[in-house]
Amino acid sequence: MAIDLHTHTLASDGTTTPAENAALASQAGLSGFALTDHDTLTGWDEAAEHCARLGLVFVPGVELSTEDAGASVHVLGHWVDRDDAALRAECDRLYAERFRRGEQIVGLLAGLGVGVDPARVAAIAGTAPVGRPHIAQALVEAGHVETIDEAFGRYLADGGPAHVAKHAVSPEDGVRLIRGAGGVAVLAHPGLRHLDLPQTPSLVDRLCAVGLAGVEAEHAGHGPDAVAYWRQVAVERDLLVTGSSDFHGTRKETKMGASTTPVVVVEALRERADAAVAAGGSQPW
């Protein structure tokens, strides 16, 4: 009785379709999964259709890009209204921003002597906006690094020699956008490279003040210490603890269902989303 609350598809930086995600969730014995592509609200109908056929719960969502003091902060929004004007406008703006940023990163890499073919980067991205994982894959293919993780560690991570900041909204505004669209906001993978543990409780407190509902403590990329730390951060602030694989298909080794959220917690999240609607947000999808 568990749901994977964070998965990606070809619409952003994954390598699978929504239908394939549904099939993989079923094969993994899950009760359902959430589709949370970066800064886009596409793919929900296909995912919902296949979940219905397979007897799975489908949770529509988005992973919204925000920035705080030059560092990337990702916020998951579940059950948002995909017709909400403010959220759609920000997703559309971020879509265009990714192309600009991708061109700049490729230019910086060329200056560092590790050039990649822009056409190949575009081909890897396909119909999705160019993101750092696509550029990382191009770096691997060009022989400059051996793995995508090495590409991030050496060049693409926040503060790295080829990092280009997004012109993204603040994390607080990201939470406000999600709540305004009738959704529930969860801080994504806080124990990964983009957040420094000693600084983060203050950020979480700021997000709690504008309606944060949960923390993705049980992320597949968190070690035991990070899981324990973020569970404690959540408990101290009456935030729900969620878990997920952050599935990206073949772009990452993590499998669907590698970490999950109990159905009872998903139901509690949905109750908080309904409360956002009662407070004046859009009707959830």
Image (cartoon, rainbow, N blue to C red):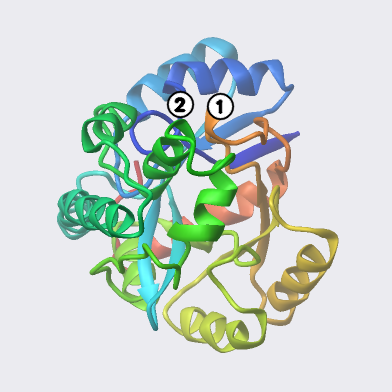
Q: Residue at x 36, y 67 (%)?
A: 66
Q: Amino acid at mark 1?
A: Thr
Above/below status of 73 relative to 98: below
Q: Is residue 277 visible?
A: no
Q: Nearer the viewer, residue 278 or 46?
A: 46
Question: Residue 197's image quarter?
Answer: bottom right
**Mark 1 surroundings within 10 Å by alpha-carbon count, few (fewer than 14), some (14 through 19), many (20 or more):** few
Question: Residue 271's image quarter?
Answer: bottom right
Q: Residue at x 32, y 40 (%)?
A: 116
Above/below status of 145 relative to 104: above
Task: Indicate which disc, 2 or 1, sits on the residue closer to the N terminus.
Answer: 2
User: Could you say where residue 22 lies in the image, as x and y percent from the top left?
Assistant: 54, 20
On the rendered structure, is 281 left or right of 262? left
User: Could you say where residue 119 lies in the image, as x and y percent from the top left?
Assistant: 21, 31
The residue tagged 1 is 250
Above/below status of 271 relative to 141: below
Provide the secondary structure element on which disc 2 rests: loop
Q: Residue at x 37, y 20 (%)?
A: 46
User: Could you say where residue 109 lies in the image, as x and y percent from the top left?
Assistant: 33, 54
* Outermost front residue: 113
Q: Nearer the viewer, residue 134 or 189?
A: 134
Provide the secondary structure element on which disc 1 rests: helix
Cβ–Cβ below 8 Å for labels 2 and 1? yes
Picture quarter with the C terminus: top left
Q: Please tell me the numbered disc located at residue 15.
A: 2
Q: Nearer the viewer, residue 141 or 66?
A: 141
**Mark 2 surroundings within 10 Å by alpha-carbon count, few (fewer than 14), some (14 through 19), many (20 or more):** some
User: Could you say where residue 57 lies in the image, as x and y percent from the top left?
Assistant: 56, 29
Whole-Å distance between the Cαs marked 2 and 1? 6 Å
Q: Nearer the viewer, residue 108 or 31?
A: 108
Q: Amino acid at mark 2?
A: Thr
